[in-house]
Image: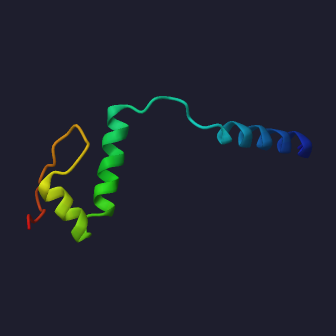
């Protein structure tokens, strides 16, 4: 096994992964990010207030999902 070759390959991979992804976000990517954000803040009273009044810049409307309690 050539150690120098392995190190060179690892460094090449590191350079490739260090480059930011320039692809545009798809609607499904944005939807997934919004869903993750909403789940993370679900217990925040300020976030629930924000959701209940629909103060939002998203194109989709807020939806009450099965199992959620509207307060």
Residue 65 shows up from this direction: no
Q: Can residue 64 be seen in this snapshot? A: yes
Rendered location of residue 36, percent (x, y): 34, 54
Q: Which of 54 and 63 is in front in this view?
A: 54
**Does 38 sit above or below residue 23?**
below
Farthest residue to the left: give it. 70
Query: Which residue corresponds to the image point at 79% horizontal and 42% vertical from the top-left?
Result: 11
Quadrant containing the C terminus is bottom left
Q: Where is residue 6 in the image (x, y as percent from the top left)?
A: 83, 43
Compared across the picture, whether 21 is left or right of 66 comes to: right
Q: Which residue lies furthest to the top in this view?
A: 23
Point 20% across, 40% down: residue: 60
Q: Position of residue 10 (x, y in %)?
A: 77, 43
- In screen coordinates, is 26 left or right of 38? right
Rendered-image quadrant of the N terminus: top right
Q: Quick one: 14 or 48, which is closer to the camera?
A: 48
Q: Could you say which is closer to the camera, residue 28 or residue 3?
A: 28
Taking 17 as reference, is 25 left or right?
A: left
When the figure is inspected, residue 59 is found, relative to residue 35, above or below; the finding is above
């Amino acid at each position: 096994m050539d150690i120098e070759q392995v190190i060179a390959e690892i460094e090449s991979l590191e350079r490739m992964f260090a480059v930011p992804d320039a692809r545009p976000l798809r609607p499904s990517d944005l939807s997934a990010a919004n869903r993750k954000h909403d789940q993370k803040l679900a217990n925040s009273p300020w976030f629930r207030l924000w959701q209940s009044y629909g103060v939002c810049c998203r194109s989709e409307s807020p939806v009450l999902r099965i199992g959620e309690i509207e307060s």
